[in-house]
């Protein structure tokens, strides 16, 4: 079987891989030095588009429109960009074995790839209801969303089941974004999740009540405090009904499941130190194994601002961690060093006409400001999180770019809060006047 050898190999061809490639190119990587091995069939793209514009009935996004690095306002790296820069893009190739001591990867087809330096950028996979042995969860038309193939499968069903009924299982990012997109596609949408309010990882009850109210006004039904325990199918094996733990039964032509992600670390189990479910790295994304780096969703890294180690499953960190790792690799080769990664957590989402951003940490007391009425013609509200007298996190719905920058600044600088009441009255002004 074929054996190929590279100075640098990136395993995984998602967001982090694309941004790492651009960074290598900036540093003048030589032809034949770098390979990206991906089991996807397409060059790295901005994954967030899949749960948003990719699924719109009109004005939809398609490749090559959203290849990296357009998501952060950068150059679009078309598939031909890679060979033009001497980078080997090995697509449709799954790595099934990694020997970190022997610096070797093996693909499903049996090819061997040798490297001097490895960057692990395998991202996450979805948690499936079949993992919990939910009865009937392998029925046709039950969808998950991780890659472009999943999105294409869902698009096929949206066409086939026009104006049908859709049940969304999960009230996190996928649940909220897909609930909206399915409604925009004219489906009769019901969302089901176990918690008392949506997006409990981040939202306070007051933030959630706005989105739940807004979705309700759009005609989306929300069922909370229960889970899907079974699915029935028709004669062709297509999903027909969703059975809930509380005894209710919902009709469904399509089910979309978003019950969380799991970092893809299995290839490296037992060979590299792990923590908090990810591959443990330092501030330069170096793992416990020499010459092996891990970036994006799989990395558990030091979050300097909070003196903690964490894993982050969001695109901004995927981009920045990839850039940091490449800068550190090149600097080390030149006998130089780079500054430690000093990340400010940044999450965002968009659905319908809504758009929110969050920066920092959602710990301590939360103060809501602004107008969070779901019937408001132009809703604009936010929340500050205050810990030990300091503002450590900020959320804003409906902000303009300047205002979003202002809340980011607050989360970074962590100013002292006079009192919770003061913050409530000052509202966005507290951030804007800093
Ligand atoms: P990513 O998942 O992008 O890439 C991993 C790559 O590795 C994939 O190409 C995969 O096929 C490949 N791979 C894995 N194992 C392999 C193997 N053994 N061999 C070969 N290849 C392998 N975040 C955000 O901040 N805002 C947003 O709006 C969204 N929206 C969003 C929508 C959807 C549908 C998803 C699924 C995710 C988001 N995210 C997001 C999260 C964000 O996209 C995510 O954090 C980044 O894509 C992570 O980048 P990585 O490069 O780490 O993994
Ligand atoms: P998530 O962690 O955001 O939400 C999971 C949700 O699943 C929970 O909130 C809960 O409501 C629900 N849940 C858990 N077990 C359940 C069960 N048995 N039945 C019903 N509901 C259950 O995960 P996700 O929404 O699946 O997203 C997957 C990944 O994609 C994450 O890494 C996420 O960060 C990423 N993503 C991010 C964005 C964004 O940042 N805007 C958008 C889409 C996806």
Image (cartoon, rainbow, N blue to C red):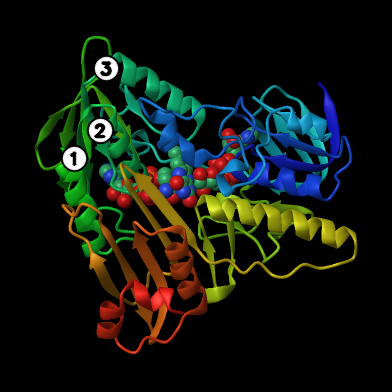
| Left or right: 242 as drawn, with respect to 81 | left
**Residue 97 lies in quadrant:** top right
- Work out how far the residue at label 1 is from the one at label 2, CA to CA, in angstroms: 8 Å
- Report the disc number at residue 161: 3
Q: Is residue 164 above or below residue 371?
A: above
Q: Nearer the viewer, mark 3 or mark 1?
A: 1
| Left or right: 9 as drawn, with respect to 434 | right
Q: Is residue 169 above or below residue 311?
A: above
Kindly check if marks 3 and 1 are in contact, taking CB atoms under 8 A apart as contact.
no
**Residue 137 lies in quadrant:** top left
Quadrant placement of the N terminus? top right
- Report the disc number at residue 218: 1
- Is residue 242 visible in this depiction of the protein? yes
Find residue 173 and report its horizontal and vertical position in percent.
36, 47
Residue under label 2, please give it: 183
Kindly check if marks 1 and 2 are in contact, taking CB atoms under 8 A apart as contact.
yes
């Amino acid at each position: 079987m074929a054996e190929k050898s590279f100075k640098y190999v990136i395993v995984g061809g998602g967001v982090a891989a694309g941004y790492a490639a651009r960074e290598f190119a900036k540093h003048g990587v030589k032809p034949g030095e770098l390979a990206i091995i991906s089991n996807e069939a397409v060059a790295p793209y901005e994954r967030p588009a899949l749960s948003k514009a990719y699924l719109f009935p009109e004005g939809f996004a398609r490749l090559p429109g959203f290849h990296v690095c357009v998501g952060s306002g950068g150059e679009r790296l078309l598939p031909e960009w890679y060979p033009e820069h001497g980078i080997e893009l090995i697509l449709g190739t799954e790595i099934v074995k990694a020997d970190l001591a022997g610096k070797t990867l093996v693909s499903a087809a049996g090819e061997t790839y040798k490297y001097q330096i490895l960057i692990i950028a395998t991202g996450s996979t979805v948690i499936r209801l079949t993992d919990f042995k939910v009865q009937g969860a392998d029925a046709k038309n039950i969808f998950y969303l991780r890659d472009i193939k999943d999105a294409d499968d869902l698009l096929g069903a949206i066409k086939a089941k026009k104006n049908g009924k859709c049940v969304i299982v999960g009230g996190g990012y996928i649940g909220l974004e897909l609930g909206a997109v399915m409604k925009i596609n004219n489906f009769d949408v019901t969302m089901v999740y176990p918690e008392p309010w949506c997006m409990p990882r981040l939202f306070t009850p007051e933030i959630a009540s706005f989105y739940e109210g807004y979705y309700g006004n759009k005609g989306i039904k929300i069922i909370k405090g229960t889970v899907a325990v079974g699915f029935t199918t028709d004669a062709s094996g297509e999903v027909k009904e969703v059975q809930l733990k509380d005894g209710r039964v919902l009709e469904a032509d399509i089910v979309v499941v978003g019950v969380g992600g799991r970092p893809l670390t299995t290839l490296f189990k037992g060979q590299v130190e792990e923590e908090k479910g990810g591959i443990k790295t330092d501030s330069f994304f170096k793992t416990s194994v020499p010459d092996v780096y891990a970036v994006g969703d799989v990395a558990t890294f030091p979050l300097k601002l909070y003196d903690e180690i964490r894993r982050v499953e969001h695109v901004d960190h995927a981009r920045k961690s990839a850039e940091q790792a490449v800068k550190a690799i090149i600097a080390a080769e030149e006998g130089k060093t780079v500054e430690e990664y000093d990340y400010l957590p940044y999450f965002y989402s968009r659905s319908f006409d809504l758009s929110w951003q969050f920066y920092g940490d959602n710990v301590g007391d939360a103060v809501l400001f602004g107008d969070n009425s779901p019937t408001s013609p132009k809703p604009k509200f936010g929340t500050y999180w205050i810990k030990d007298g300091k503002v450590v996190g900020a959320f804003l719905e409906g902000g303009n770019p300047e205002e979003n920058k202002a809340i980011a600044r607050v989360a970074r600088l962590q100013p002292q809060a006079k009192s919770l009441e003061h913050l409530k009255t000052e509202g966005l002004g507290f951030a804007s006047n800093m």
